[in-house]
Amino acid sequence: MADLPPDIAALSFEDAMAELDRIVRQLEDGRGKLDDAIAAYERGAQLKLHCAAKLEEARARVDRIVSGPEGSVALATADDIA
């Protein structure tokens, strides 16, 4: 997650989505100064990148999980995925 402000990089997926939702509602409301709207849009774009990266990390973790014998769960090795 390169080039993200540290405060965004430290957010959980859920917290980032909540802030992004607030920004979208604020922008949809249309009240406020243009400069503030542009800054909010830029932060929203950064939050979107952060959320996308968090989702990709989660997808990669889930992809590593495979069913083992008798319904047990095991982590896949690199050979299993290839």
Image (cartoon, rainbow, N blue to C red):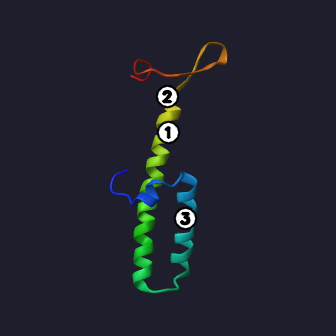
Residue at 64% over, 18% down:
72
Q: Gap in Å between the C-alphas at discs 2 and 3? A: 30 Å
Q: From the image, which quarter does the C terminus lie in?
A: top left
Please, is residue 46 above or below residue 31 in the view? above
**Which residue, as the protein is rendered here, is positioned at the far left?**
3
Where does the image place residue 18, in percent across and percent down from the top left?
Answer: 58, 62
Q: Please name the residue that numbered disc 2 is placed on.
A: 64
Quick one: SS at disc 3?
A: helix
Q: Earlier in the sequence, mark 2 or mark 3?
A: 3
Residue at 52% over, 64% down:
20
Amino acid type of the residue that numbered disc 1 sits on in the rendered structure: Arg
Quick one: SS at disc 1?
A: helix
Please, is residue 60 above or below residue 17 in the view? above
Q: Nearer the viewer, residue 8 or 33?
A: 8
Amino acid type of the residue that numbered disc 2 sits on in the rendered structure: Arg
Q: Which of 82 and 3 is in front in this view?
A: 3
Q: Gap in Å between the C-alphas at discs 1 and 3? A: 22 Å
Please, is residue 31 above or below residue 50 in the view? below
Q: Gap in Å between the C-alphas at discs 2 and 1? A: 9 Å
Q: Do the residues labelled 2 and 1 touch (CB within 8 Å)?
A: no
Q: Please name the residue that numbered disc 3 is placed on.
A: 19
**Which residue, as the protein is rendered here, is positioned at the far top?**
69
Amino acid type of the residue that numbered disc 3 sits on in the rendered structure: Glu
Where does the image place residue 42, in percent across and percent down from the top left?
Answer: 40, 69
Q: Which quadrant of the structure image shows residue 56?
A: top left
Q: Which quadrant of the structure image shows residue 80?
A: top left
